[in-house]
Image (tube, rainbow, N blue to C red):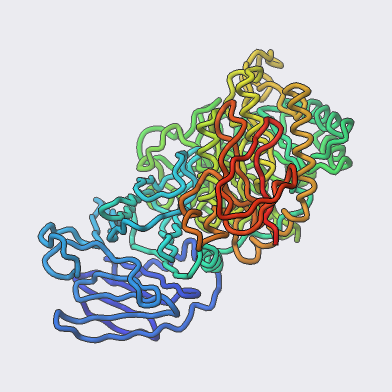
Amino acid sequence: MIFTNENGTLIAKRQGETLRIEPWGKNALRVRSTMYPALSGNDWALTEDVNKGNATVNITSREDGPFAEITNGRVKATVNFAGVMSFYRDDELILREYFRNYGGTESKESRCLKYVNRDYSPISGGDYEITLKFESNDKEKIFGMGQYQHPYTDLKGCILDLEQRNSQVTVPFQVSSLGYGFLWNNPAVGRVSFGMNYTEWISRCSKELDYWITVADTPKEIVENYTEVTGRAPAMPEELMGLWQCKLRYRTQEEVLKVARDYKSRNIPIDCMVIDFFHWTYQGDWKFDKTYWPDPKAMIDELHSMGIKVVVSVWPSVDKRSENFYDMLERGLLIKTERGGLQTYDYQGDCTEIDVTNPETRQYVWDICKKNYYDLGIDMFWLDNSEPDYVKYDFDYYRYYLGPALSCSNIYPQFYSRVFYDNMKTDDQPVVNLLRSAWAGSQKYGNVVWSGDVPSTFEAFRDQLAAGLNMGLAGIPWWTTDIGGFMTDDVNDPDFRQLLIRWYEFAVFSPVLRMHGDRGPYDIPALDDRDFGGGYLHTGQDNELWSYGEDNYKIMKDQLDIRFELKPYIKSLYEETSKNGSPLMRTLFYEFPQDSKCWEIYDEYMFGDKYLVAPIFELNCFEREVYLPEGKWEDIRDKKIYEGGQTVTAKAPIESIPVFKKLD
């Protein structure tokens, strides 16, 4: 290895590889490596202008060859003669690359396997499939990484596809129980395996390796360091901290207005009404179907007069029948296919999706949406299918303005959100839009991410808690779910109604309280027999608070009153996340890192720093055990006070779930 010190940056070269290690924020280092003559210059998620720190570089020679180390605050990286890197927090080893070859490692494992730490496998035509391996630690717990539909909060032992899919959100930042955070700063499709024998990161198509590592004493400090370099969520308007009303689908403006008027007559305030898909003519027209939305401005004005914000769904798919399709195709604004036909999406039309990595596309789509929506008074956008949703997730089939989809597809939802954020922020108003996907740094673009089209089951409900907690640890604090799950066969099923209530009670103590779902059975007649527009397409059953019987209506109203009482507290949590990146939903260990039991319990959580929430994840379950960390805790229902440091049995009648307030 040939080492040089370039103004506090360590450069190492060996056998055609250039390795660059430099300070990048508080107690943090950025590592890049390439087999090309130079680095690309892409910063990807590392967008913020921060004080990168002043690193100390030492280059020496040891008995086995040249050796170098670079230190920035409390983090240190060393590189030996074979290019094997080790990372230290306060001189204690926390992470080391996995190397099993002749020489070059301090491991006592077999050295003749010829596994190397950084492997560049060439792809025909250019670029590389890159594999990076680290030693595993049996005592380590791993969290974050975004949203995966499984019950595992601790990801140790998990294999995660680094791919955006409906309900799967790849945000490749991990928080380790060993006191470090690690960002895989690469939007390429790939995979990470947090194995017991080694950790392996794979990028299927990249020009370079790029990651960032920071150290701190607590998860809260790790997330703060991470969001300092990737950005933090902007201000959340207080008028969006109550109830969001939505269903699949309000088909006409009269349906929307009737629901809003019913809420008003019942004296139940709602923050916004969400107008779902196929309010349009064809996908890609991005406008109201005048047949059923004859005067959308009048509708919007009436909703505004009731204090209700208006959200409208926008999809990235463009039907070949759309008035915009061939113009966009001619201009090169659509995703390209590497072979075969143009189709990338086939729901209710033969569609190709927009290439939002192209700045010209982003401006083109915004200009249409501004004219047809924003100028009418639409407040927010529901950016659905924002992965984007494909006919099949064959990423080698697609190509973007930025390059092959394999090399950059994971950043697509972030660019999609910027179609709107970059233009709306100029109005000097807080920007809030609803998305189904995100990537590292998406939090700074006003994204409320929801957990996608998940089933209406208790098993899926349990998975959403793991998803929400890990999204928060990955820097995405604005997160929500479809209350009751998305896919319901029968709204009259008492088991479903119990699930709905339990989900609703949980959602009261989540960042965004939002009613939504595709409610069966589908026995509502179509509005017309056209084969386009929203009139012929199915709609789900009613999904308002009063749609599920008087008993359930009363429970949801009472729970909504709790939400209203909490608004000043929730406002303070949103202000905190803008200040230091802390999520609203937090694992127990986030607030109590010194309590070893808090690192083992994942079926309860903290809503901010004061409320411990214990959801009910089983049918006909009316009590559960709840662990209370050290301190004094008050059951918010009966005001009974408990000493912490113990597990208690808490009642959970259908009217409420256990919630305990931490007393100072």
Q: Position of residue 426 (x, y in %)?
A: 72, 60
How many numbered badges does the structure rendering display? 0
What residue is rendered at 16% in x and 80% in y? 65
Towards the viewer: 50 or 294? 50
From this viewpoint, is residue 362 visible? no
* Quarter holding residue 652: top right
Q: Position of residue 638 (x, y in %)?
A: 74, 43
Q: Position of residue 450 (x, y in %)?
A: 59, 42
From this view, report whether residue 92 is shown above or below residue 581. Answer: below
What residue is rendered at 60% in x and 56% in y? 583
What residue is rendered at 77% in x and 51% in y? 567
What residue is rendered at 75% in x and 47% in y? 639
Which image quarter holds the N terminus? bottom left
From this view, report whether residue 537 is shown above or below residue 162. Answer: above
From this view, report whether residue 63 is shown above or below residue 334. Answer: below
Q: Position of residue 229 (x, y in %)?
A: 53, 68
Towards the viewer: 596 or 217? 596
Which image quarter holds the C terminus? bottom right
From this viewpoint, is residue 52 visible? yes
Q: Is residue 543 left or right of residue 591?
A: right
Q: Is residue 163 left or right of residue 68?
A: right
* Quarter holding residue 126: bottom left
Towards the viewer: 611 or 549? 611
